[in-house]
Image (cartoon, coloured by chain):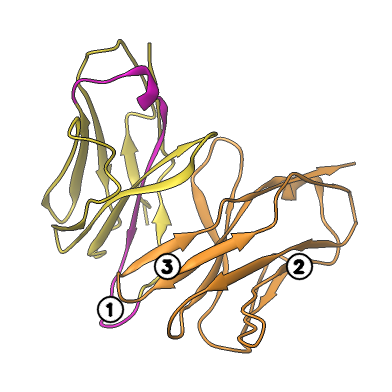
Amino acid sequence: GNSVTQMEGPVTLSEEAFLTINCTYTATGYPSLFWYVQYPGEGLQLLLKATKADDKGSNKGFEATYRKETTSFHLEKGSVQVSDSAVYFCALSDRQADKLIFGTGTRLQVFP
Amino acid sequence: DAGVIQSPRHEVTEMGQEVTLRCKPISGHNSLFWYRQTMMRGLELLIYFNNNVPIDDSGMPEDRFSAKMPNASFSTLKIQPSEPRDSAVYFCASSSRTSGSTDTQYFGPGTRLTVL
């Protein structure tokens, strides 16, 4: 079945460091891929998405490229800020079941 | 746009009591999802509706849980009787489903439930 695997956290970085959070997926067909972010005490918010192979999603300095050959959708940011501290979820669309499949989430902590 | 609205934001109750959580999806969205989030189990999909019809309730933990969607603008998740292990944050999300695609889900702020 469809599934998403993302790296364990927490990821701890200093401000202005480079961020990578790995995400790989298993899916039949051609799913859309998503990154959601959850700030403390809030619901999940869409950060970015990509709908087909080689698409790059980007928002707020974050980027992720849909890599079909490696079944990956790694999240990157060139210079993180303290305000980026949150939990990040990778997800894919299960078109047959018409729902999203979420990874377990990766907590990012950025210190000044 | 008001976004997904959930009420109450916080609920504290005693074991054995009935709990009802409420959700108003974004106007025009025709899919609605209920999730539960805990530290131990992460984010779990409980049930989802398309056009007010329950499609998949395989994530509902047991018969104590029930969900309804009487119309396009309102859904409830009920727990009766509640137990301490039901303590969690419950999220509602909605999306606009087009033929053959799964669109972005928009989440509400959640209801933090504590069962004593």
Between A12 and B51, which is closer to the camera in this rendering?
A: A12
Which part of the image, by quadrant, shows the C terminus of chain B? top left
Both labels 3 and 2 in a single chain: no
In which chain is the residue bearing label 3? B
Please tell me whether residue A102 is drawn above or below residue B22 in the rendered image. Answer: below
Q: Which residue is under mark 3? A: B104
Residue bounds of the magenta highlight: B80-101
Q: Position of residue A49 (x, y in %)?
A: 55, 73
Question: Going 19% across and 30% down the picture, which residue do you hit?
Answer: B64
Q: Position of residue B114 (x, y in %)?
A: 40, 19
Chain B, colour shown: yellow
Question: Which residue type does callout 3 highlight?
Answer: Thr
In which image quadrant can residue A47 be found? bottom right
Residue at the outermost front position: A1
Question: Which residue type does callout 2 highlight?
Answer: Glu
Please tell me whether residue A103 is drawn above or below residue B75 in the rendered image. Answer: below
